[in-house]
Amino acid sequence: MRGLTAALFWLLATAALAVTLPMAWAQCNLVDAGGYARLAQKAAAQPALQKAVAAELSAQTVQLIRATGFNIDPSPVRQAAAEYTAGPSFPRQFVQVNTDGHAWLLSGENTGPWEIDVVPMLSDPAFADLLSDYNIGLPASMTVPLTPTSTEVSRPGGLHRIAVWGPTLSLVLVALTGLCAVLTLAAARHRGRALAGLGVSGLLVGAGGWSGIEVARRYLNPLLNQATGDIRRIAEALVDVAESSLHQWLNLTLTVGGGMVLIGVAVALLGTLRKS
């Protein structure tokens, strides 16, 4: 009877861990404003993202200059944009843009589409000499829309409920997973085998998570496709950084799971030697 009870709690612990791990990761890295800002800062250092942002800024700057009647060669504009995205100001401003977008989705206090004002970026010294050559002053604002408001998620406050309930739900899931693990150990006749079994749970969840990411990416692509051109490339670069972060969590789960299996086997062998 104890073996059946332990097996039941083991199944519950494995299922709870499979839900808790991605939820806890999402809470720490996507829902939490500070965590998302750190994720955006990592993304700002990626060459692919810098290139996409530079291309978008180049297009906006060329459009601005040509609107004044100058037929400008885009090459120096692209050079200035590349200098800006590789410079020290870009990470801070990119994080601010993403923080605003985070609030747009989760705060529930905004209306209309998510737009960014590129004027603070074009005010960087990297563009100053170029714009002064054409005697161009920047307007008060120059917005670029990033998302439509046609879906349930990509609208102002579309994830507000997650922001409200996410922290509590994550804590409940973590507590439930820990409780099931403790009950598994308490109900088992052989603690070493139970510990190894919990390690196997970590291995199963870690490996399953890697497969789950590949499946989830197929469903995420239609959302990314709501944006086009350079904005699409920027969003994809952010997703790549988030995916890498989740991979790190899964790798840690695999490492801890493997360690628990080894410890559990060692404990079981020591118990067997003591009895003999």
Image (cartoon, rainbow, N blue to C red):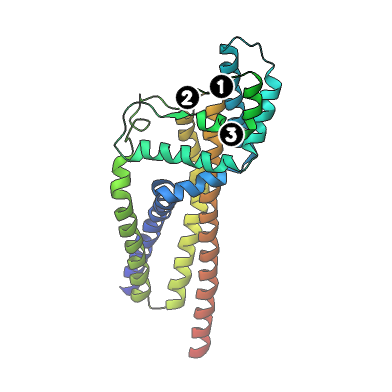
187 left or right of 264? left
SS for dot 1: helix
C-alpha gap between disc 2 and disc 3: 18 Å
Residue that numbered label 2 is attached to? 144
Q: Nearer the viewer, mark 3 or mark 1?
A: 3
Q: Local crowd at mark 3 within 10 Å, few (<14), some, or many (≥20)?
A: some
What's under tag 3, amino acid-wise?
Asp
Image location of residue 8, percent across then percent down = 33, 64
Q: Residue at x 33, y 74 (%)?
A: 187
Q: Quadrant of residue 69?
A: top right
Q: Nearer the viewer, residue 179 or 241?
A: 241
x, y percent for residue 133: 66, 21
Element on which disc 2 rests: strand
Q: Which residue is mark 1?
A: 60
The residues tagged by marks 1 and 2 sit, at their Cα atoms, a distance apart of 9 Å
**Alpha-carbon distance for marks 3 and 1?**
14 Å
Q: With respect to residue 176, does 74 lie above or below? A: above
Q: Residue at x 44, y 67 (%)?
A: 198
Q: Which mark is residue 124?
A: 3
Element class at badge 3: loop
Query: Which comes sooner in the sequence, label 2 or label 3?
Result: 3
- Residue appearing at x 41%, y 38% in the figure: 100
- Mark 3 or mark 1: whose residue is earlier in sequence: 1
Disc 2 residue type (three-letter) = Val
